[in-house]
Amino acid sequence: MTSSTSDSLILVRNVEQTLKEVKTRLIMTVDIGRRMKYRSLKRWKYELLEDMEVPVPELVQTIRTRYIVLSCSFLIVRAYYAWDGPSGPTFDTKTFMRGSLFHDALCQLIAEGLLDKKYRKYADQLLRQIILEDGMSKFRAWYVYQAVRLYSRLKGM
């Protein structure tokens, strides 16, 4: 084997390894009975890679934005929506990701004036419901809920 052939093989192996590492780092799959694909970003923490939806029976209005759709009592977050994941002094765990996605989407609609701020408490309750469904401990879900409610009260919502 010549030196250039050997160098080419090493280069190909390095490229293959780098691609494998990038793919592993960028695409994370959460499998907790509900599949969710997202990737890490620089400016925002995460970007959703496929549409996700959750029933929201309290919300019957219709709102459509580029990445968030509220219609027929369903909240749909479209692929490529970017969000910052769980906020505060916490860890971004599998049991927190889906809840943080839908909570951030509802809070964004409220912040943009598309959804009345009276629904902030409902968004916080939905967060608690989802994180419990996804397997978060009751104690951790309790203090997460208390933290978002405190933040809401401090912001006057």
Image (spheres, rainbow, N blue to C red):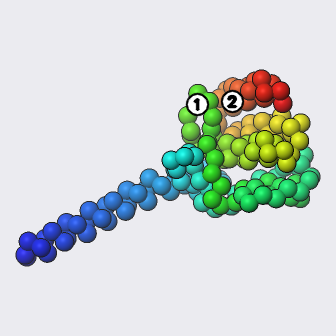
CA distance for labels 1 and 2: 9 Å
In the image, taking residue 60 as reference, residue 48 lies left or right, namely left
Secondary structure beneath dot 2 equals: helix
- Along the line of sight, the residue nearer the viewer: 49 or 141: 49
User: Label 2 crowding class (10 Å Cα cut-off): few <14, some 14-19, many 20+?
Assistant: many
Q: Which mark is residue 144?
A: 2
User: Where is residue 68 shown, x and y percent of the image?
Assistant: 75, 55
Q: What residue is disc 1 on? A: 90
Residue for point 26% across, 62% down:
14
| Residue 149 visible here | no
Is residue 122 left or right of 81 when viewed as pictured?
A: right
Quarter of the image with the N terminus is bottom left
Instruction: Answer whether labels 1 and 2 touch (C-beta < 8 Å).
Output: yes
Instruction: From this view, report whether residue 121 is shown above or below residue 62.
Output: above
- In the displayed structure, would residue 71 be above or below residue 1? above
* Residue displayed at 78% across by 27% down: 155
Of 30 and 81, nearer the camera is 81
Helix, strand or loop at mark 1? loop
Mark 1 Cα-neighbour bin, 10 Å: few <14, some 14–19, many ≥20: few
Quadrant in the picture for residue 45: top right
Side of 4 relative to 77 (left or right): left
User: Compared to 26, does 7 lie above or below?
Assistant: below
Q: Earlier in the sequence, mark 1 or mark 2?
A: 1
